[in-house]
Image: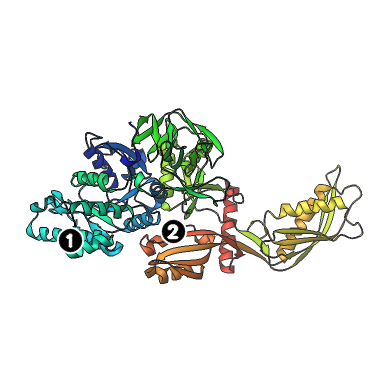
Amino acid sequence: MAVFDAKDIRNIVLLGHSGSGKTSLAEALLMSSGAIPKMGSIADKNTVSDYNEDEKEHKCSIGSSLVSFNSDGRKINIIDTPGYIDFIGDMIGGLRAADASIIVVNSTGGVEIGTEKAQRMSCEKGVPSMFFINKLDKDHSDFNKCIESITRKFRKSCVLVAYPAGEKSSFKGVVNLITGQGLDTLADSDKAAAQAAIDTLSEAVAETDDALLEKYLEQGKLSADELKNALKKSIADGTIHPIMCGSSTLNIGVKELLDFMVEYLPSPAERPQTEATRPGSDGAERFAVKLDPNGPFSGFVFKTLSDPFLGQISIFKVFSGKLQSNGGFYNVNRSSRERVGQVFTLLGKQQISMESVHAGDIACVSKLKDTRTGDSICDEKNQVKFEDINFPEPAIAFSLKPKTRSDEDKIGNALHRLTAEDPTFQVTRDEQTKEVIANGMGDLHINMMINRMRMRYGVMVGLGTPKVAYKETITGKGDAQYRHKKQTGGAGQFAEVWMRIEPLERGKGFEFVDEVAGGSIPRPFVISCEKGIKTALQSGSLAGFPVVDVRAIVYDGKTHPVDSKDIAFQTAAKFAFRESLSKAKPVILEPVMDVDIVVPDMFVGDIAGSLNSHRGRVMGMEPGEDVQTVKAKIPLGEMYKYVNELKSITGGRGTYTMTFSHYDVVPSNVAQAIVEKAKLNKKEEVEE
């Protein structure tokens, strides 16, 4: 593929609710540009961007894909993203590389949850956005209702630049409201509505500039050049969000959209320069990276793919300089040098070789050793670090259990590849419960990753609810004496330990105190006592959970001149501790989380009630724009599947993040159920 100047490149991310037709629109854009001879379809499982087998099976995008093509001397990089909120990581990564977003809206449903999320994310990331109302050929499409929902939700900065000719089965084309081309093809009623939309567009554009507004108020119109130049500027700075329309499956309105993208959406050269810092400066030295193809190379990896033949593919955007095939760069995040082979771009899964990639463009390399999504890459002599991608914390967790020995051998490699591809899919190992925990954004996210593990890597796993890392402690004091005596015909074992235990402040862990007087237990055997107690700490008296926040005091004991030894005192101390524990009013502790729940204002009351039913405590609220952040403390055991309830209450509009706060005592009624379940699990383990 040829090298393009930044001014001739358009980096566009497709966003929108699931089912709005983003993948079909990408397909139609490819067809309209001549990049493919024939359009594929979701139903026939042959689209360019949904090429993975699991995407074909589920007929929806699961990860973002890159399609690059030429149109009238311009290079267009389209990033097609999934619509389900569970795959929000790909939307965030795509926005990081894009210079504009096209938010696809289903004309049969209007503004949906995914539409709201897409527009809000575009605004938060400072990415200019526009809307494409799709599926106007469908029986239940309603263009006017769709426009009302967009302008009501996103205010008057959203203005029509195209108008449909016909509707539903009679939909046959679109009218250009900027030039007026096609107006005479409309029926009288539609012509009046289109003319009103032209007036609204002119007024909105005029209001972006004081001089233009004055002229518009005096003369009632703007010249074609004034309208065009001011519209382009106002789209780039985010003051106007144009609305176009069409049908991607019938390829109506798509050529007009492609022309609009080239003419009005900003190139990398028309966007604000990206800021970076010098490594090691703690972010103090911030500067703008100049979009200069002749400057030192710098770029940012925003997506990682796993290809069964090529291995890992890193997709990156270049912010300065250029990268040659068979060259190399320095990875600032990993402090490592990387050699690259062929630089290429993608048309779905098809690779298109490039001799080099220049500032403003997007490209790929494969088989890098250390590079991951979110890494800054650059010339080693001119190191720069771009801002990290802020991926949301996972909201749901499941335990993973390989189904066979073969699966157990292969699961590590499969999980490594999946987590590299999707940073919102995280895998941890709980050292207390010994479980492998898969963390994701929702049920759908986890299930899709497990399905991908099966289809791509041949690994079968079972899903279970993770065990909560409960602990045990004491609320009172306990005292015990234990004599360990063992005769086996040869050397015997003898030890007697007197011990008392008492509670420590929460979070202090364990403290051992030696109060032995008169040498009744020699010092080496006192150390043996401490070892034995630490062994006993691993399993409490209620349900076998680790014991914490306890002070153990050994104050007396007896020895035998021949049979006393290290193992004997370890054993005696262990059993003395267990007896003391049962007398010291043991209780179960559970992890409590700090949870921030962001919901629209109208759902705050429902959320408060929901939290009460999950033993949560609301600690406060922080107002935002049309939303509230409810701050609460909730036991971890109540949170593993809370994301599903939150989706149900808010219609998918609510999100939450959580971090560990502290351990607290479990209420007695809940503790009893935990103890019974722990006993049942132990019984099942013995039977197995």
Residue 197: which quarter of the image?
bottom left
Task: Name which of mark 2 and mark 1 comes first in the sequence.
Answer: 1
Q: Residue at x 82, y 52 (%)?
A: 527
State whether residue 242 appears in this view. yes
User: Looking at this view, is 45 or 39 the one in front?
Assistant: 39
Q: Is residue 167 left or right of residue 103?
A: left
Q: Which residue is mark 2?
A: 643
Q: Between marks 2 and 1, how big is the CA–CA gap?
A: 45 Å
Q: Give the residue type at disc 2.
A: Val
Query: Residue 148: percent from the left, percent from the top?
Result: 23, 63
Q: Which residue is mark 1?
A: 199
**Mark count:** 2
SS for callout 2? helix
SS for callout 1? helix
Query: Residue 39: percent from the left, percent from the top?
Result: 23, 38
Q: Give the residue type at disc 1.
A: Asp
